[in-house]
Image: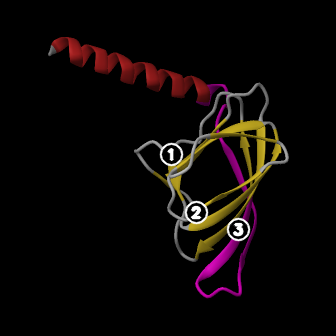
Amino acid sequence: MKTVRVVTLTVVAAALSFLTLQAQEGKVVKRNVVLKEDTSIPGREAVMAHVELPPGVAEGPHTHFADVFVFVEEGEITLENEGHPTVKLKAGDVFHIAQGAVHQAINNGATTAKLSAVFVAEKGKPLTTPVTTPAK
């Protein structure tokens, strides 16, 4: 039982060290909302955002109270999207995330991935909600 605790604590410590190192190196996902306006759809708003994922960074599993339409501007990502096979996407590719789907983008490449995203979001709800279960 002590061995299991030691191994668990070691894994947790290593993960925290990795996350701390990423933050210290500036390797965090950058999100910049460039437009937020009401739509003609009752209870919905349109949000446009620019997203940058540095090399070696994952967004972390999350959901949206929105349908999201994304264009990969630069670089490459791996997309884990609930209910869909994991795919690799490159500059010029587009994808859709259904409202409530657990997903994450991961940059395993050597350069920063840049994405443009349009959210058709429920007004008054958070744009992004982290989850603790990995996307499948």
User: In the image, what residue type sits under mark 2?
Assistant: Ala
Q: Residues within 10 Å of mark 1 (few under 14, many from 20)?
A: many
Q: Residues within 10 Å of mark 3 (few under 14, many from 20)?
A: many
Instruction: Name the side, left or right, on which 41 lies relative to 73.
Output: left
Q: Are marks 1 and 3 in contact (CB under 8 Å)?
A: no
User: In the image, what residue type sits under mark 3?
Assistant: Val
Residue 47 is tagged as 3
Residue bounds of the magenta highlight = 23-49
Residue 61 is tagged as 1
- Residue 112 in which image quadrant: top right
| Residue that label 2 marks | 98
Residues at marks 2 and 3, CA–CA distance in whole angstroms: 15 Å
Indicate yes or no whether the magenta region holds residue 43.
Answer: yes
Instruction: Name the side, left or right, on which 101 lies relative to 110.
Output: left
* Residue drawn where x is 29% and y is 15% of the image: 7
> Nearer the observer, disc 1 or disc 2?
2
> Nearer the observer, disc 2 or disc 3?
2
| Residue 39 image point, x, y percent | 71, 82
Q: Secondary structure at mark 1?
A: loop
| Residue 114 image point, x, y percent | 78, 44
